[in-house]
Amino acid sequence: MIINDYGRPVGAALFLCLTIAAASAQAGPALVVETSQGAVLGKLGFDEGQEICLSWAHSVTGGAVQDCFENRRGTMVLTRSYLHDFAAGLGDIAGRGTIAAADGGGYWITGIDEAIPGNGLLLRVGAPRVGHVLQTADQSLDLSAVAAGARVTLRLAADRPQAAAD
């Protein structure tokens, strides 16, 4: 049984997540979500040039926030961020991307282009009201449903070919 960082078991939702991950297992690069104990909670295909975004609600204002990453030749790169406003802890850093108004409000910071050290991003998954979700154009993984309160790592894992049978 997997225990989150608050000492609570991660049960049926984790089983469902693992079942989905196993069914969608694929060769090729993937964004793997692992607990601090090393258990894999999910996996999304993450081909070169593909974008995966992490979305959530800001803990103070409840507004939408999103960080988007790209697989650039095997390196996980933060490319852009969406911020609903300049709420607590949000804003731009001089020389780090370009700010542009977003359709429907808020703004995007584009052109960030920062490699994630070690291809792994540590995240404390928020409660369901925070709604940490990973999304691609055709896949999603609701982290808050399967790992609320847990410390996880989002890691770009390279393709690992299977060893040939001797």
Image: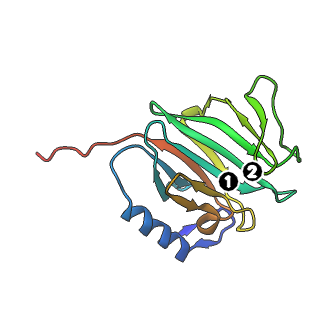
Q: Residue at x 77, y 22 (%)?
A: 95
Q: Is residue 95 left or right of residue 111?
A: right
Quadrant for the C terminus in the image: top left
Q: Residue at x 75, y 29 (%)?
A: 98
- Position above or below: 133 against 153: below
Residue receiving disc 2? 65
Residue at disc 1, secondary structure: strand
Q: State the image coordinates of residue 124 (x, y, percent, origin top left).
A: 68, 54
Report, in whole angstroms, how far the alpha carbon at label 1 lies from the one at label 2. Answer: 6 Å
Q: Residue at x 59, y 73 (%)?
A: 9
Tell me which amino acid carries mark 2.
Val
Q: Is residue 138 left or right of residue 115?
A: left
Q: Kindly give the residue lying farthest to the left in the view shown.
A: 166
- Position above or below: 98 against 91: above
Disc 1 crowd, CA 10 A, few/some/many (<14, 14-19, 20+): many
Tell me which amino acid carries mark 1.
Ser
Total marks shown come to 2
The one of 86 and 42 positioned closer to us in this rendering: 86
How does the figure colour the protein chain or chains?
rainbow
Q: Kindly give the residue lying farthest to the front in the view shown.
A: 103
Q: Quadrant of residue 89?
A: top right
